[in-house]
Image: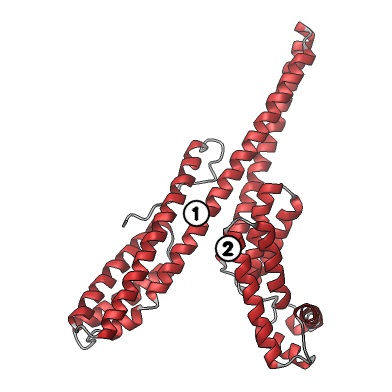
Amino acid sequence: MDYGEEKFKAHIKAVVEAAQTDETLEERPLTMDELKELALSMGLTTEEWDKLQQSAHVHLKAADDHLKARNFTEAIEEAKKATAINPYIENGNAVLAKAYMMLWLQSHSNEDRDKAEFHARKELKVDPRDQIAVNVLSTIDKKRRILESDNSSRKKILIVVAAAILILVVILSISFQSDDSSGSTQTSSETENDQVLDQLIESEEEVFSKWDYVQTAIDRRNNLIPDLIATINTSTEESRALNQTIQDLQDKIKSSEGEERFQLENDLNATIQEAKHLAKESGESENINNLMMQIESSENRIAYEKKNYNEAVKAYNILVKKNADKYPQYEVKPYFSDL
């Protein structure tokens, strides 16, 4: 049996719909093993399954690239292809959610906003801690509350304005001029406020995006830490203490945020430098030299991404400070200070 990609999408859709009638699965998403088992039972071969799963990841990578390039429509199309093949692919619905949210900021379409919320909640069913999905829901909720507050304030303003106009009609008989001027000013004010709010949201999303790059670079460096520790003579008390310190810091970083996290990252960097010094003292073998080159390359990448992050934070913080009175829900974010 030769399954093309389009045929497979229809096949998987049927599989998911069939699974939804299973009462044991109503309260949770299917696991990948369960999805694969159902697919194989319908005639798909293991080789076809593996090939098409690879295709899903290719589509999702393309979607992520389009999202970073701000090609939101293309990002949505590629992410849809990925999730059509694998409805539970990691970050698939998160990418869809963010792409729809960013499109919503351009189109102001409630349909785009609703789709962003739908896919964010769908991602959270699979991964309740997915940060992209959490940020999308938080951003939409924040803008919704701000707009509701603005509308309430505008209603009060309109009541006051209407009363003032009525008085002017009676006293000065210039109602039409006052009404036209007031309406024009109100419309202009609303448009300006919407633009500022969208700028805040997009600027905050840029900060989130740059932070993802920083975290990816840090993770790559941290993946080399076990190899670094392995080069050190772990029989000494100093090396054992250093290894334990690194592990403790990494555990604390996982549950920290903001300035506390940045300080812990700085502490981890300092501890890794100590470990590098001990590793160099162990000798100048080719393996150690190659490892040091990899770590230093990773550290250069971290520094580069931190610089980009700080620049995004600066742009965001300027917007926040300029509009603190109108939008107190947005707060300044901390910088990395070890650059």
- Which label sits in the foreground, 2 or 1? 1
* Placement of the N terminus among the 4 image quadrants: bottom right
Does the image show residue 89? no
Three-letter code, disc 2: Ile
* Front residue of this view, candidates 168 and 78: 78
* Front residue of this view, candidates 198 and 143: 198
* Placement of the C terminus among the 4 image quadrants: bottom left
Which residue is most to the top? 172
User: Cβ–Cβ below 8 Å for labels 2 and 1?
Assistant: no
Q: Position of residue 27 (x, y in %)?
A: 72, 77
Instruction: Using residue 24 as the reference point, say whether residue 234 is left or right of it.
Output: left
Instruction: Using residue 173 as the reference point, say whether residue 90 is left or right of it.
Output: left
Q: Residue at x 66, y 57 (%)?
A: 72
Does the image show residue 44? yes
Disc 2 crowd rating (10 Å Cα; few below 14, some 14-19, many 20+) is: many
Q: Is residue 65 above or below residue 293?
A: above
Residue 199 shows which numbered tag? none
Please identify the quarter of the rendering in which residue 76 is found.
Answer: bottom right
Residue 207 shows which numbered tag? 1
Three-letter code, disc 1: Val
Estimate the spatial distance between the alpha carbons at disc 2 and disc 1, rounded to whole Å.
12 Å
Q: Residue at x 44, y 61 (%)?
A: 257
